[in-house]
Each structure stands twice: as structure tokens, then as C-alpha cells.
Amino acid sequence: MSSRDNPIVRPTARVVLLNAEGRLLLLRAREPDADTGRPFWFTPGGGLEAGESYEDAARREVFEETGISDITLDPAVWLREHLVPWRGQWLKPIERYYVARTGEAEIVRGYLNDVGVTISEHKWWSVDEITASPDLFVPRRLAELVAPIVAGNLPPEPIAVGV
């Protein structure tokens, strides 16, 4: 059984997926814990499988969660570690965020991922829409973080982005 002091470590690849208009694809789900159940928006991605690289996991997860297979993957831009209570366990995702671009727009929805999250909705967001929205985004500073990425300014090394 995991605990706050001994969480399940989960290497995770996430993708800042941009379309030709510079809009960011976000997926919507609900926290599975009964005490909150808050909806939140997040980038496609998920845990690495045995022997899989972060880059391979990023490509696989984009396909599994969206059906999009035609992406160009750039280097990792963000790093994120946090503790989260999840279905009676404590998880510690160790996330690497990659930038990818696609010309595709059609998304396969309703996918249930390996930690029990059902994706209920998807949306291509502009930076201004994220900034103006009262919704919960992961990471919390998403609008601030993604603005330079959309403008084509990738950091030379991945930066820690906090919760």
C-alpha cells in the first residue's frame, strides 16, 4: 500500500499538442476521488510501459487518447513532479512534457486510461481562452507556460513547472 511518504512513482510523458493555428489540445476528466470529483483539463499523456522511452510513451499516449498518429515531437520543455491522492493510493508522477505539432483535428474520445480517468471532452484552446477560463488546468500555470511555446520559443533545457 502506498502512502504520502512512500508513493507509487509513475514516470509519465505528456504532450503539449498544437494544431496549425497554434491552439493547444486539452482533454477533460474528473478527479476519481469521491471527496472532490472536480473536473480538470490536461494535456494528452500517461505512464511509461516497461522498457519504453519517454518519447515513445508520448507518441503512444497521444495516439491512444486522441487517435492522432501524425505528430512531430520536439524535445522536452517542462518537468513536473507532485504527489497526488488517487483512488486510495498516493501517486508521484514524474512528468516530462514534450511539444508536438499536428495537422489533424479529429479526436477519438471516451478513452479510459490506466489510472482510471475517463476523458469526457476535448477542446483545442487558444492561450487567451485558457487565461480567461475559470476552469482548473494542469499544470496550474498552463496559460503562462504555454504562451512562449505557441510563439515558437522553446526553452533550451526543460524547466520545472510546479504543480
Image (cartoon, grey):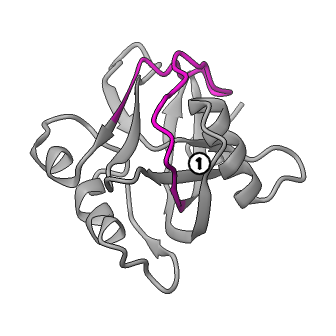
**Which residue is tagged 1?**
92
Span of residues in magenta: 98-123
In the displayed structure image, the side of residue 160 where residue 86 appears, left or right: right
Residue 150 found in image quarter: bottom left
Residue 66 position in % (x across, y down): 56, 32
Residue 118 position in % (x across, y down): 52, 18
Using the image, determine if residue 79 lies above or below residue 159: above
Residue 67 in view: yes
Q: Work out which quarter of the rendered image holds the N terminus and state it.
A: top right
Q: How many numbered marks, from 0 up? A: 1
- The residue lying at 30 percent from left, 55 percent from top is 142
Residue type at mark 1 is Lys
Q: Nearer the viewer, residue 53 or 153?
A: 153
Q: Nearer the viewer, residue 83 or 132?
A: 132
Q: Work out which quarter of the rendered image holds the C terminus and state it.
A: bottom left
Q: Is residue 108 covered in magenta? A: yes
Residue 76 found in image quarter: bottom right
